[in-house]
Image (tube, rainbow, N blue to C red):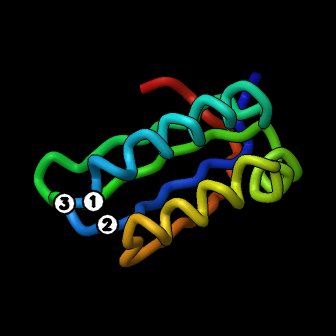
Amino acid sequence: MDACVAVFGYLRFPPEKLVLVRPHLKVLVEATYQHDGCIAYDVAEDLFDPGLIRFSELWPSANALQQHLVAPHIEPWRVAARACGLLDRKFTAYSLGESWVV
């Protein structure tokens, strides 16, 4: 299945709060893979910028992404993120045309 929407983004938390964030992220990622039809949904802490969590996502369609954004597990994640001191958030979605392996 070729992806037609890619999303890249980040969340920033106080570095000392990441220990609280990680369990909520695990629930988010597992629920997304189980229920939302993503092709890839990857989350990683930036090794050189403490407190920065990077996201990369591949979705089969814009509709699948939109459904993810209103899925039942999203609002509890957002509440938890705010409670853990979310400082900044930025995500950008790109429509993909032809793709190839490099």
Answer yes or no: do the residues labelled 3 and 1 have beta carbons within 8 Å? yes
Image height of 84 relative to 28, above or below: below
The amino acid at mark 2 is Phe
Bin the neighbour count of mark 2 within 10 Å (Cα to Cα): few under 14, some 14-19, many 20 and up: many
Which residue is under mark 3? 16
Is 68 placed left or right of 78 in the picture? Answer: right
Asked whether the beta carbons under mark 2 and mark 1 sit within 8 Å of each other, the answer is yes
Residue 80, position as x, y percentages in the image: 53, 60
Q: Is residue 1 above or below residue 85?
A: above
Instruction: Give the class, few, some or many, for how many residues have Cα within 10 Å of label 3's Cα (few <14, many ≥20).
Output: few
Q: Is residue 100 left or right of residue 45?
A: right
Q: Which sits in the foreground, 38 or 13?
A: 13
Q: Which residue is mark 2?
A: 13
Image position of 39 with respect to 97: above or below: above
Identify the residue at horizontal 11%, vertical 53% (top origin): 48
Give the Cα separation between the discs numbered 2 and 1: 7 Å
- Of labels 3 and 2, the one closer to you: 3
As displayed, is residue 22 above or below residue 76? Answer: above
The amino acid beneath tag 1 is Lys
From the image, which quarter does the C terminus lie in? Answer: top left
Q: Amino acid at mark 3?
A: Glu
Rendering coords of residue 3 (x, y %): 70, 35
- Name the residue beneath numbered marker 1: 17
The quarter of the picture where residue 17 lies is bottom left
Q: Residue at x 73, y 28 (%)?
A: 2
